[in-house]
């Protein structure tokens, strides 16, 4: 009699290739085709409605309820032209997954016929039952009312099913009394706070023309892909997301020849299908490759504004699992599905960008500009030092605890890797010594600030929070997590730290110190107080 495993292997061997045909040869021809983009808004909205939505996206202006009717009509007409029959407010409750309640555009009329209708009120606000969503203990179990409210800064999109299409409208989720019940509402507050503090520092000390800033985020997604028959043969894997019993594999990671190897044909077909669906939804996937562990893979998009990047990552995980079903695969997003081999993370590459296009965490060849870079660089270190407990809490989960500290996973203790040259630069500032660049560029002792080369340090795979040349990489985030949790903390502590820096610097300037000297004195104090979390 065949064992369950033997039957699974027999089923795997009989699998047939799933044919995948992208809509066009060039991704640019169908990228964003299922997204209510700026060009779609220009086509389907009135000039007044288009201006209102654009102002909401760019400046955070509120959209008047009367204007919302026009926006809703245009959005409905665009969706129907794509074959959509239903709409939903798409939100991110504290479950870590996404949630949705579908409503039909269909509405009967008094004469027995029907029309497709979508009013501004339905676009702006909906009322899903909030009683069964986690709330952190702020509500009684019998208090059911909750509201979803439209987030114009994240574009509406269309999810395609095998038998229908749904218009999804990104929203925040709050209780009847206004408390946040999701990740998006506090994330938007954190982003507003950090933008305000960044602009305040930059415009006061470095560039008075800067009036806006935004946070850049690139999320690398690791995952395991196994045949569904093999997964079903493991009840522990099916029920818990990880193997709990059994022997270690005969071949683990001794050779690690899977890493960056040739992608297996069946997996390649899945990746092409998965990427095609993501491109339609405007998710800018850039890379795909085999990861270190057997059957482990990774995909990564281009960098985006944080709110959009997180929406896209949540959507990406959903699409990944649905596409895997078509290919008779099971996607494992558990941080440590198998003992003895690497687990999966979700590396969050974070940086700050001004309205002038300057990456505040990118060093330059211009020593004068590097005072601005060092200001934000040192303030990040100080923020992490002072709030390491919050950062640790933001990535802690049952699954991630199994991953942290093993093999290539970052340790559970929050620390920062900045590299040898940046350590030398900060030490020279602390000790009032000049430093010399080891590159061909020559002397770097100009206005007390050195020239600092981009990508001049080796990446560090065992740091939970590493500087990688022009950004910080929060490597400790788990593969199944909603990155909003970590980004709420990161942006909030950075906003708080920059506000403190501004107050400390202004106090020295008020005492008669020159602006540059005051900034340097504060940075030296911060570095001296925070250097114990830096490791080489």
Image: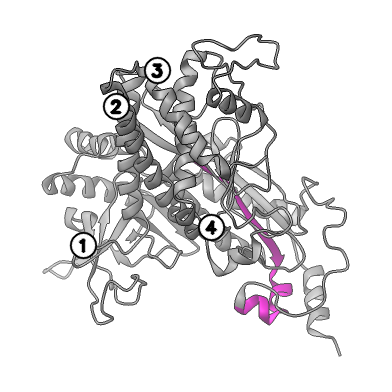
Mark 2 or mark 4, which has the lower sequence index?
4
Residue behind mark 1 = 178
Which residue is the site of mark 3?
516
Q: Earlier in the sequence, mark 4 or mark 1?
A: 1
Question: Mark 4 vs mark 3: which is more N-terminal?
Answer: 4
Q: Picture quarter containing residue 210?
A: top left
Looking at the rendering, the stretch of residues picked out in magenta corresponds to: 217-239
347 part of magenta stretch: no
Percent x, y for residue 502? Answer: 32, 31
Asked if residue 1 shows in the view, the reply is: yes
What residue is pinned by disc 2?
A: 506
Counting other residues with Cα less than 10 Å from the Cα at mark 3, is it few (<14), some (14-19), or many (20 or more)?
Answer: some
Q: Nearer the viewer, residue 330 or 117?
A: 330
For residue 372, side relative to residue 290 (left or right): left
- The picture places residue 135, in percent across and down from the top left corner, at 33, 70
Earlier in the chain: of badge 1 and badge 3, it is 1
- Is residue 234 highlighted in magenta? yes
Residue farthest bottom in this picture:
1
Q: Quadrant of the C terminus?
A: top right
- As rendered, which of 194 and 240 lies closer to the eye? 194
How crowded pointer 4 is (Cα within 10 Å; few <14, some 14-19, many 20+) is rated as: some
Total marks shown come to: 4
Tag nearer the camera, 1 or 2:
2
Q: For residue 33, which quarter of the picture?
A: top left
Tell me what residue is drawn at x 17 percent, y 57 percent: 121
| Horizontal and vertical percent position of residue 487 | 44, 49
Q: Are marks 2 and 4 in contact (CB under 8 Å)?
A: no
* Residue 123 appears left or right of 346: left
Res. 317 mark: 4
Secondary structure under tag 2 reads helix
State how far apart marks 4 and 1 are (Cα): 29 Å
**Taking 374 as reference, is 46 above or below it?**
below
């Amino acid at each position: 009699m065949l064992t369950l495993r033997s039957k699974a292997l027999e089923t795997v061997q009989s699998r047939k290739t799933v044919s995948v045909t992208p809509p066009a040869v060039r991704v640019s021809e169908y990228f964003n085709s299922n997204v209510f983009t700026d060009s779609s808004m220009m086509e389907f909205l009135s000039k007044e409605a288009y201006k209102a939505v654009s102002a909401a996206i760019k400046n955070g202006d509120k959209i008047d309820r009367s204007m919302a009717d026009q926006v809703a009509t245009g959005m409905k007409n665009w969706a129907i032209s794509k074959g959509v029959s239903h709409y939903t407010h798409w939100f991110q409750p504290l479950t870590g997954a996404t949630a949705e309640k579908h409503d039909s555009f269909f509405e009967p009329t008094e004469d027995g016929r029907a029309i497709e209708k979508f009013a501004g009120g339905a676009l702006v606000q909906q009322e899903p039952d909030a009683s069964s969503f986690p709330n952190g203990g702020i509500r009684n179990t019998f208090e059911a009312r909750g509201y979803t409210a439209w987030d114009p800064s994240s574009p509406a999109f269309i999810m395609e099913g095998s038998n229908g299409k749904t218009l999804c409208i990104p929203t925040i989720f709050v209780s009847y009394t206004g408390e946040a019940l999701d990740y998006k509402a506090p994330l938007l507050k954190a982003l507003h706070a950090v933008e305000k503090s960044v602009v305040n520092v930059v415009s006061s000390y470095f560039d008075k023309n800067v009036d806006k800033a935004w946070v850049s985020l690139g999320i690398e997604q690791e995952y395991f892909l196994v045949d569904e028959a093999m997964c079903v043969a493991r009840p522990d894997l099916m029920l818990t997301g990880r193997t709990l019993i059994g022997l270690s594999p005969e071949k683990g990671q001794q050779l690690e020849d899977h890493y960056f190897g040739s992608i297996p044909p069946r997996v390649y077909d899945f990746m092409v299908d998965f990427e095609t669906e993501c491109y339609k939804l405007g998710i800018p996937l850039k890379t795909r490759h085999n990861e270190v562990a057997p059957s482990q893979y990774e995909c990564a998009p281009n960098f985006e504004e944080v709110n959009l990047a997180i929406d896209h990552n949540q959507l990406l995980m959903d699409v990944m699992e649905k596409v895997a079903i078509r290919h008779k695969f099971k996607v494992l997003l558990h941080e440590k599905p198998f003992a003895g081999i690497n687990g999966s993370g979700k590396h969050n590459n974070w940086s700050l960008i001004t309205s002038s296009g300057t990456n505040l965490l990118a060093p330059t060849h211009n020593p004068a500009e590097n005072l601005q870079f060092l200001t934000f660089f040192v303030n990040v270190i100080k923020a992490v030092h002072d709030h390491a407990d919050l950062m640790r809490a933001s990535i802690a989960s049952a699954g991630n605890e199994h991953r942290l500290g093993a093999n290539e996973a970052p340790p559970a203790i929050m620390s920062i890797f900045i590299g040898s040259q940046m350590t030398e630069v900060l030490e020279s500032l602390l000790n009032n010594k000049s430093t010399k660049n080891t590159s061909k560029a020559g002397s770097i002792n100009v206005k007390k600030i050195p020239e600092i080369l981009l990508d001049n340090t080796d990446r560090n795979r065992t740091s939970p929070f590493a500087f990688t040349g022009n950004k910080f990489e929060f490597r400790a985030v788990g593969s199944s997590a909603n990155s909003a949790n970590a980004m709420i903390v990161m942006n909030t502590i950075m906003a708080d730290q920059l506000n403190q820096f501004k107050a400390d610097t202004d106090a020295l300037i008020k005492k008669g110190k020159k602006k540059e000297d005051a900034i340097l004195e504060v940075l030296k104090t911060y570095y001296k107080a925070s250097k114990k979390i830096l490791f080489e």
